[in-house]
Amino acid sequence: MGLKDRVKIAKAASITLAATTSQQRNDALRAVKEALIAGKAKAFEANELDVKAAEEQGLGKSVIKRLRFDEKKLTGVIDGIDQLISLPDPIGKTLLARQLDEGLNLYRISCPIGVIGMIFESRPDALVQISTLCLKSGNCVVLKGGSETARTNKALFDIINDAATKAGLPDGSLIQIEERSQVNEMLECTGLIDLIIPRGSNSFVQYIMSHTLIPVMGHADGVCHVYVDKDADIETALKVALDAKTQYTSVCNACETFLINREIAGEFIPRFASMMKEAGVKFHGNKEFIDTLKSLAPDNSECELMEDSAYHTEYLDYECSCKLVSDVDEAIAHINEFGSHHSDSIISTNKETIDHFMEMTDSANVMSNCSTRFSDGFRYGFGAEVGISTSKLHARGPVGLEGLMTYKYKLFGEGHIVGDYASGTKEFHFKDLN
Amino acid sequence: MGLKDRVKIAKAASITLAATTSQQRNDALRAVKEALIAGKAKAFEANELDVKAAEEQGLGKSVIKRLRFDEKKLTGVIDGIDQLISLPDPIGKTLLARQLDEGLNLYRISCPIGVIGMIFESRPDALVQISTLCLKSGNCVVLKGGSETARTNKALFDIINDAATKAGLPDGSLIQIEERSQVNEMLECTGLIDLIIPRGSNSFVQYIMSHTLIPVMGHADGVCHVYVDKDADIETALKVALDAKTQYTSVCNACETFLINREIAGEFIPRFASMMKEAGVKFHGNKEFIDTLKSLAPDNSECELMEDSAYHTEYLDYECSCKLVSDVDEAIAHINEFGSHHSDSIISTNKETIDHFMEMTDSANVMSNCSTRFSDGFRYGFGAEVGISTSKLHARGPVGLEGLMTYKYKLFGEGHIVGDYASGTKEFHFKDLN
């Protein structure tokens, strides 16, 4: 069966899945959890082969670490499933209840989106998180994981799919695709797949966004900033700068650009330059920054000259851009122009300046006196996340269960017709119920 | 100045506009209202020319009626502005407040989307409604109205724009484009325009959706259904059927297809056929329906044979498709396959059947015992609407103020870094605030 036909089945299943009770879906999650524990040997075995192949291909240590699926990762995903089970049912919430007129009652009720297409990196725990998030929220899902963990993905998918259907969820609710070529088939499932969530490199996400008519949620790049205000506490600034840049360099919410207020440069830059050099971070900057660095931190003044237009660079590595600014407004303007509206932080002790920054910076996540690295579904307490959105439509920022829901309007009448209201025979009498 | 440069200015203005107070925006709306009253002669005069030109072109009566902007329409839009002023401010609502750990507090705060691109039909009152909705919600907007009312649009836009900027809202917040060619320029403003809302014909909306990378909200077609259940009250069924089909045929929520339960056909069809004939509605149906019609209503049995695949037809006229079904499940399956997920109604006295239909029908608006024509922002009590969305992302159904809002996460820390949580030195302690 071709992918489109399988997705058609999922589309039909999505209606049944949406109508299951919270208990049915939680029971299925419990069954999935037990099946993962019972079948772990199979998953670990498959993962051994994936890891071996990756090592033979000479993939880096940090990549291998991400590919690995072991007892520790299993414990993590099991904890995640327990957390999901404990969360309230997102389906069937009454978001609005309003009497339009005598006997004519309107309700806005939350319901699943339908069929989600999810493309994600080579991280087996992500497969478990995403599929269980979809089951909890009553959504069908087409899963395409990274090819480096194809064997592990298959083993995990079989365990989850088998347990979920045995627990009574509709057949065909979960689909796994393994070939890269099937991604293009997926992009053509307009009207069948309701939402695509791609995770991966900037160019990959851009490709997805421009090759499908299906709505896409996610982010292409993460050019995040830390602005060190004139009223910054220097210790806080140094601590946050180091964490935002180096705690995990290859992720979207790592800091790429430091904006430094000229008034605090003399105090901040010498220690900043020495700290970053020690951490192995390479500087890029405009002429003014280079001159300032040379005069303030002559021993740590290595810095590559960059054009102003290059301030949109996402390094995802031990490198960063630096720039001096006059005030918070220049910082805001820079971030709104060169950033990616993802996560941006201000370091300041001035409450007014902080509030101004957080109001005017047009980003999904704005922070004060803490690291940009905090923008993440788990750290925000949403449980697992399906991704981070920099779009302003639907969900913005880290997207958990809520982002997988939509709503429908239910209108209950007693023979009401519009003609009566158009002619003036009847009038609306809006009244919120409850 | 090219459109892109003007939109760049609007993009910058959108940040300032978003930071205005509720009072500033309400004052501006009051100024707009007064300016419309004071400048009405100019608008009426421009409208006279538009109407004359339309009449000379031989446009139909109902079109002319839509083009007209007179005292009555003015009163309507003024009422709308008063209603908007009285609504609570949608900006700055705290949607979530959570302590992540001691001193690390997360807030989800509502804010405007930014710059909206709005393309709408030749209806001058729509221009006023849309621009004032955008001002209330703190969004900048690029307006492209139908060319048949170009003169009226220009007069109204000048009045509104002038009043809003004089009242202190940022210059360049409102942009009007008049040339059709500029629509394509608009579609290329990726990263500057945050959302495009097109209203118009199916093919026009399809064109917009497939020619831009900017998110699009709206609906292309409206293939709406009325299902007459075996437990229907016949009088209700007849009354609703007539209203849904004929109260206003050229709109998206008019009924296009009637699904009739075989068990009630004998009772319903004779009266239905005679009523529809009298109303001038032409039938299309499959062979079974034609045969049934001939035997049950020989005097009113005119019906054009249609292929099953044609059940997705949107007539927007005094025509409809008809089909017999065995039960509510067959009706649901038909609607989910051939409908456009817009507005669908069941006529039944059986509560269980109604609930099942409203649960399983995958449409933005599901109704029972009332007309599909009710799905509309005004009738739902949302005030004016910018359009109706059949997408499941962001806003679904009639879209009012709420659909023009997004949110951002604000995270306030005291030097918090992710490294401490990754290493286990610190742990998150999620606690909802308030």
Image (cartoon, coloured by chain):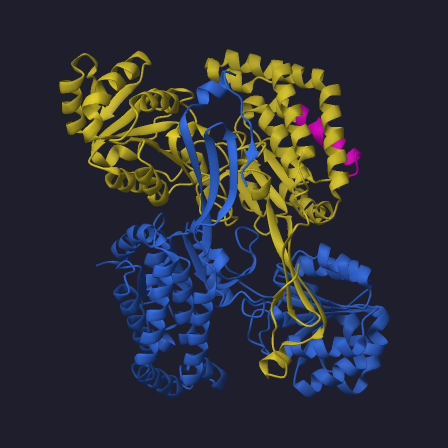
Chain colours: A yellow, B blue
Which is more toward the observer, A427 or A117? A427
Quadrant of res B336: bottom right
Say which residue appears at 16% left-offset and 19% top-offset. A296
* Residue B70 in the figure: left or right of residue A21: left
Q: Is residue A158 magenta?
A: yes
Q: Position of residue B280 (x, y in %)?
A: 65, 85
Most prominent secondary structure in the magenta stretch?
A: helix
Rendering coords of residue A298 (x, y %): 16, 14
Quarter of the image where one finds residue A37: top right
Q: Is residue A409 above or below residue A131?
A: below
Residue A249 horizontal/vertical position (percent): 40, 22
Q: Which of A337 and B312 lies nearest the eye of the viewer? A: A337
- Residue B167 appears in the picture as rendered: yes
Image quadrant containing the N terminus of chain A: top right
Where are the magenta residues, as a range? A155-168
Q: Residue at x 84, y 72 (%)?
A: B264
Percent position (x, y) of residue A342? 40, 37
